[in-house]
Amino acid sequence: MSRQIIAEFPFVERFDELSAEFPGAGLDWLDTMRRTSLDRFNRLALPSTRVEAWKYTNLRELAKTPFEMAEASSGSASLDLSEQAAMGSESAHRLVFANGIYNASLSRLETLPDGVIITNLEDALTTHGSLVRPHLERLSSLEEDALLALNTAFMMNGYVVIVEEGIEVGTPIELLFLSDPSSPTSIHPRNLIVAGAESNAKLTEWHVGSGDSDYWSNPVTEVVVGPEAAVSHRKVQRESASAFHLAQTRVSLAGNATYTGFLMSAGARLSRCEVEARLEGDGANCELDGIYLARDHQHSDITTRIAHTEPGGNSRQVFKGVLDGHSHGVFQGQVSVSPDAQRTDGHQLNKTLLLSEGAEIDTKPELEICADDVKCSHGATAGQLDELELFYLRSRGLDAEEARQVLIRAFIAEVVESVEEGDFQDQLNTIIDDWLSNGLSTS
């Protein structure tokens, strides 16, 4: 049987017409790579639920939507940022992308230290092409992935952050992707983070949609962490209630490098956030924490793959979700340990709170161990609020709604507190408060 979903997206049919306006158009190596990736996508099509990795996430509704590409003029639109005021808008280093198009007027890059490049992909291809090219070429040829191929063919813009050896970026770098198109639109950002040896950088990435805008965001982010470097990468997905968000983050870590990732998924009609980290140097360290919140008929998929390929690596994952209404959550977490990766320490935990009879979770933790000197574990639980705890809180004067909210906050607190105290933690708590204030199911 076919393992593909055939989709006739109008923008794919218009590749020849659109490609002249793409970032880097006219660069032979890039034009060839785009065309090769388009051919690969047309051959692969979208994955169906018969593909094991997509068993729980169905893309048929996505395939039925007649998406077009965002127009360049949409990036210069004057967007109201009042609702995003809590996004650390005082950051000195901020790039803003409106409907997938870089918006210079809303961006701010002040007092960049020497040895730091923060720019958009289009400008990076012009001014730093020799630095960007090897990463685009490496990622595009890694595997037969239809969504990665589509992103490579149609990458419209995105951010590029390059930190040279030994440099520390003291101020967090903020990346905002704001979407409010007037018709079904596809957005394909390509992002790149490169941290040189012994460097340090913190990035906060927001994907936010307005109202019920119907669009598809398909971002791909590559993170390269050099020897003894440290990258903190925090991402919040709050797309519109009608949006599709299918994101991939690919991380490679050298010896004694550290990647600290945080993910919150609280928006979109259907979302899938994939994180793949390869610990390719001795003593590399990867920490992933995340929260997923879903209600009504939302579908939220978190898929992680951690590959230990060298000795002495450490990985830790903690993901917690809260599902209400008729929402559907998915957590797929794989930890693999190669024969050479002795002294690996890898742990994974997924817990989900189901607030209604209609909510559903599919969780699939997985260990693949080919070495003998390791410490690895995984666990997954799903359940409802404890009736005795609810009774206790109500006996202390809280009404039923207040008691449930207290227990939900307590359930999520472990993950929220894993984030360094400060503005970002406050922003997470605000998002959780907003989600809870919209009301919870009574069964």
Image (cartoon, rainbow, N blue to C red):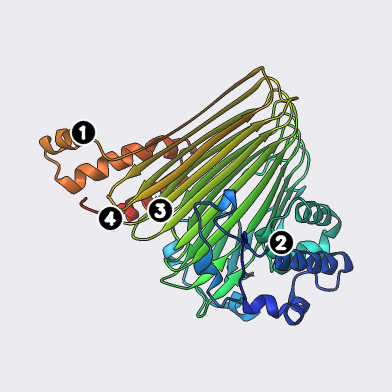
What residue is drawn where x is 75% and y is 52%?
139
**SS at mark 2?**
helix
- Tell me the quarter of the image containing the N terminus: bottom right
- Which label sits in the foreground, 3 or 4? 3
Q: Which residue is mark 4?
A: 437
Measure the C-alpha gap from mark 2 to mark 3: 27 Å
Instruction: Residue 328: give its label.
Output: 3
Q: Are marks 2 and 4 in contact (CB under 8 Å)?
A: no
- Give the CA separation, mark 1 to mark 4: 21 Å
Which of the two discs, 3 and 4, labels the residue nearer the N terminus?
Answer: 3
The picture places residue 163, in percent across and down from the top left corner, at 74, 46
Looking at marks 1 and 3 on the same chain, the residue that comes earlier in the sequence is marked by 3
Please identify the quarter of the rendering in which residue 8 is found: bottom right
| Residue beneath the point at 47% across and 48% down | 330
* Percent x, y of residue 136: 78, 56
Q: Is residue 261 left or right of residue 268?
A: right
Q: Earlier in the sequence, mark 2 or mark 1?
A: 2
Residue type at numbered disc 1: Glu
Along the viewing direction, whichever of 86 and 246 lies nearer the viewer: 246
Label 1 or label 4, whichever comes before in sequence order: 1
Return the residue at label 1: 389
For discs 1 and 3, the disc positioned in front in the rendered view? 3
Labels 1 and 3 touching (C-beta < 8 A): no
* Three-letter code, disc 3: His
Above or below: residue 108 compared with residue 361: below
Residue 115 in the image, given as x and y percentages of width and height: 77, 47
Q: Which mark is residue 149?
A: 2
